[in-house]
Image (cartoon, grey):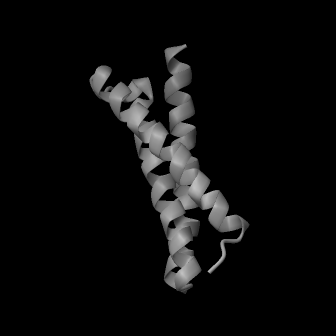
Amino acid sequence: MALDYRGEVSILELMVYTCALLTSIYLSFRHRLSRNAGWIFLTIFSLVRIIGASCQLATLSSPSNHLLTAISTLDSLGLAYLLFTSLGLLSRV
């Protein structure tokens, strides 16, 4: 089965956010998991984006309403953690 553009974007998201997840985990432990630093929110944001991209790839083989609901929920949840991350990192400046 050939990938469409959504599948290619999901694979790219998996690569980018896996690197971001590893970096944010390292920085979270280095800064002792303080919430005001913003790194813990970047870790959660990366996890949400990885799970969302995985669900998007899962819809290629068997599309269902449950996976589409999970994708839309994770996208909206990811937006909230993106805002938390930006507020946490801007508070350090």
Position of the N terminus by quadrant: bottom right
58, above or below 62, in the image: above
Residue 12 location in percent, x, y? 60, 52
Q: Residue at x 30, y 21 (%)?
A: 30
Picture quadrant where residue 33 is located: top left
Q: Residue at x 32, y 26 (%)?
A: 34
Picture quadrant where residue 27 is located: top left
73, above or below 65, in the image: above
Q: Nearer the viewer, residue 11 or 48?
A: 11
Q: Residue at x 42, y 30 (%)?
A: 39
- Determine whether, in the image, residue 64 is placed left or right of residue 32: right
Residue 77 location in percent, x, y? 52, 55
- Determine whether, in the image, residue 88 is placed left or right of residue 30: right
Which residue in the rendered view is the most extreme toward the top?
93
Picture quadrant where residue 41 is located: top left
Q: How many marks?
A: 0
Q: Residue at x 46, y 45 (%)?
A: 18
Position of the C terminus by quadrant: top right
85, above or below 51, in the image: above
Q: Nearer the viewer, residue 92 or 61?
A: 61
